[in-house]
Image (cartoon, rainbow, N blue to C red):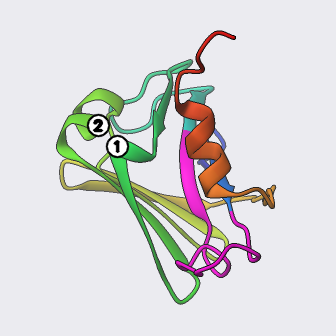
């Protein structure tokens, strides 16, 4: 996302889905968002400075979908740490919000939908025992 050609805001969510898992808990239609990487380049946006980059995993936000809109709402601790309350992408517009202020701009999206199991992703987070 860019505003007036100055700063660019990058958001890279990792979405996982697996239509073959049973019972279907909804990830066949809407991805399980495992994490999101955020970065600002070329200027400041809201509370972000040029070069800021932050990452949070699925425990720091709730993902929802309504029509063409995909929204990530960050919990209070995560919002304080990353400087965003909510991020919404609807069609070709990205909106970021923080403390009652919002910024919307056209977005160029590339989606890399990985057909991998949310179960496998979550198991990968657990420590592995030594043989």
Residue 55 percent coordinates (x, y): 50, 30
What is the C-alpha distance between the residues marked 1 and 2? Answer: 6 Å
Residue under the image location 41 percent in, 29 percent down = 48
Compared with 59, 37 (above or below) is above
Residue 54 percent coordinates (x, y): 48, 27
Compared with 83, 75 (above or below) is below
Q: Nearer the viewer, residue 43 or 85?
A: 85
Tell me where the magenta segment starts and ends, as one range. Answer: 17-36
Number of residue marks: 2
**Element at label 2:** helix
For mark 2, does the 10 Å Cα neighbourhood hold few (<14), some (14 to 19), or many (20 or more) residues?
some
Q: Is residue 18 located in the magenta-colored stretch of the structure?
A: yes
Q: Is residue 95 located in the magenta-colored stretch of the structure?
A: no
Disc marking residue 89: none
**Element at label 1:** helix
Residue under the image location 58 percent in, 84 percent down = 68
Residue under the image location 58 percent in, 81 percent down = 23
Residue under the image location 36 percent in, 38 percent down = 46
Q: Badge 1 is on which residue?
A: 60
Q: Residue furthest front?
A: 131
Mark 1 / mark 2, whichever is N-terminal: 1
| Res. 120 visible in picture | yes
For mark 1, does the 10 Å Cα neighbourhood hold few (<14), some (14 to 19), or many (20 or more) residues?
some
Quadrant of the snapshot with the C terminus: top right
Dominant secondary structure, magenta: loop
Q: Badge 2 is on which residue?
A: 78
Which-is-in-front pick, marks 1 and 2?
1
Residue 125 percent coordinates (x, y): 55, 32
Please report contact status of discs 1 and 2: CB closer than 8 Å, yes or no. Answer: yes
| Res. 7 visible in picture | no
Q: Nearer the viewer, residue 47 or 56?
A: 56
């Amino acid at each position: 996302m860019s505003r007036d050609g100055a700063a660019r805001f990058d958001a890279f969510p990792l979405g996982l889905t697996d239509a073959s898992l049973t019972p279907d808990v909804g990830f066949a239609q809407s991805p399980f968002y495992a994490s999101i990487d955020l970065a600002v380049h070329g200027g400041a946006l809201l509370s972000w400075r040029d070069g800021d980059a932050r990452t949070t995993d699925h425990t720091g936000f709730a993902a929802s979908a309504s029509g063409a809109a995909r929204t990530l709402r960050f919990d209070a601790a995560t919002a304080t740490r990353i400087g965003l309350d909510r991020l919404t992408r609807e069609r070709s517009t990205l909106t970021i919000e923080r403390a009652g202020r919002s910024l919307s701009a056209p977005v160029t999206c590339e989606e890399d939908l990985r057909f991998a199991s949310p179960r496998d992703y979550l198991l990968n987070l657990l420590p592995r025992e030594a043989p």
